[in-house]
Image: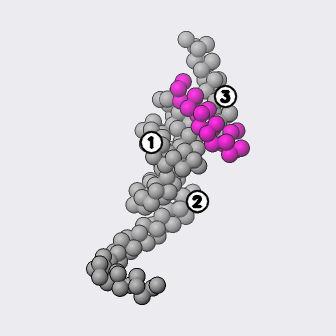
Amino acid sequence: PHLKENYVGKLCANYKEEGNAMFKQEKYKEAEAKYTQYIEHDSNSEQAAKVYCNRAFTHIKQEHYQLALNDCATAIGLYPMYAKAYFRRACAYCAVGQWKLAVKNFLKASEILPSDQDIKQKYQWAIKEERYQKFGDSIDIVLPADLIKEELISIE
């Protein structure tokens, strides 16, 4: 059993390294595939949480935000104190305009890593975006149909 564990460990390490190399070359689909191969062999460890988080980043780069959110949730389930997973999940929420959830996840990441300036900056930015969204929602006024028609006529 020990030899098999060593073999699987080395295999997984190779998949992760290859995935990281593909990511750096901006070959996100290929990186995703390597991370998936890793997960097929180890899907339930703290190291796997990091790989899920890496794969989430490939999903974000490919604009597959729901897949990114799913991988971040899995990573957090495996490693609840992994700030990067909350950070990436917050970024995915930003991408889909879910500012309240983004703020919540940036806050959690900031609580885990209070000295990280990038997290703090993005947290503050997300708070502003959430306020803008609330403001925009509060001034959305439904105009009567006749007034809208009048407005369209006068613009022409």
Q: Position of residue 131 (x, y in %)?
A: 41, 71
Marks 3/1: CA–CA distance: 24 Å
Q: Which residue is label 3 attached to?
A: 14
Marks 2/3: CA–CA distance: 30 Å
Marks 2/1: CA–CA distance: 23 Å
User: 23 and 122: which one is in front?
Assistant: 23
Q: Which mark is residue 70?
A: 1
Q: Residue at x 57, y 41 (%)?
A: 54
Query: Which amino acid, by three-letter code, is at mark 2?
Result: Asp
Q: Residue at x 59, y 49 (%)?
A: 61
Task: Report if residue 28 lies within the magenta region.
Answer: yes
* Foreground label between 3 and 1: 1
Secondary structure found at label 3: helix
Q: Residue at x 71, y 44 (%)?
A: 25
Secondary structure found at label 1: helix
Q: Earlier in the sequence, mark 3 or mark 1?
A: 3
Task: Report if residue 12 lies within the magenta region.
Answer: no
Q: Position of residue 28 (x, y in %)?
A: 63, 42
Q: Is residue 50 among the parts visible in the rendering?
A: no
Q: Which mark is residue 112?
A: none
What secondary structure predominates along the stretch shown in magenta? helix
Secondary structure found at label 2: helix
Query: Which amino acid, by three-letter code, is at mark 1?
Result: Asn
Q: Which residue is label 2 attached to?
A: 118
Report the span colored magenta: 21-41
- Total labels drawn: 3
Query: Which amino acid, by three-letter code, is at mark 3?
Result: Asn
Q: Is residue 149 shown above or below 95?
A: below
Q: Residue at x 54, y 50 (%)?
A: 63
